[in-house]
Amino acid sequence: MSSSLALAPAPPSEAAERVRAEVREFLAAELAAGTFTTHVDTWLSGVDPAFSRKLGQRGWLGMTWPQRYGGHERSAMERYAVTEELLAAGAPVAAHWIADRQSGPNLLRYGTEAQRQAILPRIAAGECYFVIGMSEPDSGSDLASIRTRATRDAGGDWVVNGAKVWTSNAHASHYGIVLVRTSPLDPADRHAGLSQLLVDLSLPGITVNPIRILDGGHHFNEVVFDDVVVPGDMLLGEEGAGWHQVTAELAFERSGPERFLSTYPLLAEFARRACDSGDAAQQATLGRLSARLLALRQLSLRIAAALDRGEVPDIPAALVKDVGTTFEADVIDEIRRVVAVVPSLDSPDPLGRALAEAQLHAPGYTLRGGTNEILRGIVARGLGLR
Amino acid sequence: MSEHADLVVGTVRDILAAHEAFALTPERPWDAGLWADLADAGLTGVGLPEEAGGSGGELSDAVAVVRTLAAGAAAVPVAEQLLVAGPALLAADLDLPSPEEPLTIATGGVVHAEPVDDGDGPGRWTLTGTATDVAWSGVARHVAVLAAAPAGIEGAVLALVDAEGLATSEARNLAGEPRGSLVLGGAPARGALLSPARAAEVRARYALARAVQLAAALEQVLDLTVRYAGEREQFGRPIARFQAVQMELAEMAGEVTAVTALVDAAVQTLARGEDVVLAAAAAKVRAGAAVEVVARLAHQVHGAIGFTQEHRLHHLTRRCWSWRDEAGSELTWATVLGVGLLADGPDGLWPALTRVV
């Protein structure tokens, strides 16, 4: 197979298994104490700053970063184990998720020393949350077409005008890494002239308007920038290198276990049903779904190992996200085929509630972080087809 | 892959390249010429220890041989010999026949074993009944038969049967590979009693062997399809330039990559000597599930030419359609996995999942 898609197997990590056991114990205690209840898709909807701070205190945020920035210098494999355990438990991790997953690593890679010093320790403490500023009302899959622009004023500061959408939890976050056009669009090189700005969301001129998803939940927002003055030293990385930086960021965004575990709490609830019923069709379905999940784990682990080797596995990450998010939605219908259960958020049956949560969030799985059509285009490039 | 495995793979490829693609027919149920060349090069004993008559090397070397031959749609019982019957006999302290004589495994049907002492000492059994779905029946000179243990005894008996002179009924899988029955008339055979766990491991090895073959064949199907899409021109350009075709190829690549990752992990579980039953079950089920997508889209992209006997694609796709339900059907292994993951009770799924591979 094409070498850009193939990744070496992940070596077993004893350290990862140790921290996995610690997280599991912590989560069992928190669940028993009632500090959270399990839900589907909590990395989008489970905002709980107190819980995020607890994770920070345990050393489970910023795990792979240098200690001088509040990190813990642990491997991507260890971080993988922690994130996977949190997702499997359906824990409320949304507040810090973006900051820990991609904004922090992006700052680490491209930020100035001052930016890193100011922000990374707060992310690692579970106190500072980020949003992704990529999509716009007229720019979804065609990200290079964004129109939010930043111009330098006389004092060297950036003046930002435009709007970003689908901005998860902007109402509960402190910063955004915002992709802006800093030079006019060059039709010959549409990827040129883009830059990333580190934007404090409390700046004057920023308006956060809720966009409710189909079940009424408020996770998304429109973030409007109206002559927002961003200090000149808040450029992230190089002016004009925004496209390249975004590509690297997306490798982090697309490869993690949240790309196949969003509906895991539903699968766990289904397993309880299959265990109680002893029903053969349910057991086989559990086996089939588990086999798919196990393969996705191996893919995601391979990517974690590649990150540990310092690689930027953007093409395999696109592939994992395509296969993984397809799985997340399939879980719903595979279960429906073998259990007579009516989905409802008000169901007395926990399986009915989990199905309802998973179903109502399902359209998002294969859209967020790059639609599966775009991802398959990236995979096709990896196959040498374009 | 190790340097040694690279060398082994290179040798297998050279030998394969010297043989034409083999069309299985009832009259030509295997590629005896290819087998002879592989045996001459010591490749039918890879991964089996030299002191037992094998060629030495690691499990990963044997897997590399099996993968290469599966990708080449080779009509020889190498997977059965190197990954299943050979290691199972050795694990049961039974002698290995010469690796130059094809050896297969039989786990299906109803076969009973009773101990005999015919003067040759203990460890001899009479086998009665019919072994079904025997890979390479009529071709393999020796068969490692997994038989039911005598009444009241747990586990199974693994016995090495000389296939010469056994009554066989012919049957073939979708690719034309022999999958007939063997009637075991009570001739004494050397064998050993296996605990239920050891017997389950033999079955799991068989499933994993098929999963290894499937992974290799599916990868080859993807390669052939990508290549074809790049060569075939319609509307004045290669069909690979069309987004609709690109989406299909990307979907195939996702399936193949997922299968490879899980099969590799299951092989490593076996290599580490850990319990391999659930890992093998998962690998087999995942590989089988991928066949549906990969074979369908491969034929779709190849168009009518891929539907013809003269085209090479069917040598792989027909095998895949069969292998996914051999060595235990997909349903059987999905159930084994589902039940196994629930062994620790209703809340045990996640810890179980993180232990499988």
Image (tube, helix red, strand yellow):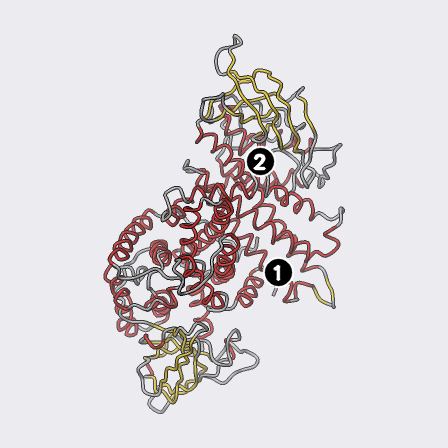
Question: Is the residue at mark 1 from the same chain as the one at mark 2?
Answer: yes
Give amino acid for label 2: Ala
Count neighbours of disc 2 (C-alpha within 10 A) and say few if under 14, some if 14 to 19, many if 20 or more: many
Q: Which residue is drawn at 59% across and 56% down?
A: B252
Residue A118, x across and y down, in percent: 26, 73
Count neighbours of disc 1 (C-alpha within 10 A) and say few if under 14, some if 14 to 19, many if 20 or more: many
The quarter of the rendered structure image containing the C terminus of chain B is top left
Residue at the front extreme? A348
Say whether residue A174 is left or right of residue B185: left
A194 in relation to B299, above or below = below
**Which residue occupies the foreground of this view, B281 or A97?**
B281
A56 in relation to A144, above or below = above
Residue A132 in view in this figure? no
**Which residue occupies the foreground of this view, A197 or B116?**
B116
SS label for mark 1: helix
Q: Which residue does the numbered mark 1 point to in the structure image? A: B248
Q: Which residue does the numbered mark 2 point to in the structure image? A: B79
Name the quadrant containing residue A71: bottom left
Chain for numbered disc 1: B
Chain for numbered disc 2: B
Residue B172 in view in this figure? yes
Residue B290, x across and y down, in percent: 57, 51
Residue at the bottom extreme? A154
B246 in relation to A339, above or below = below
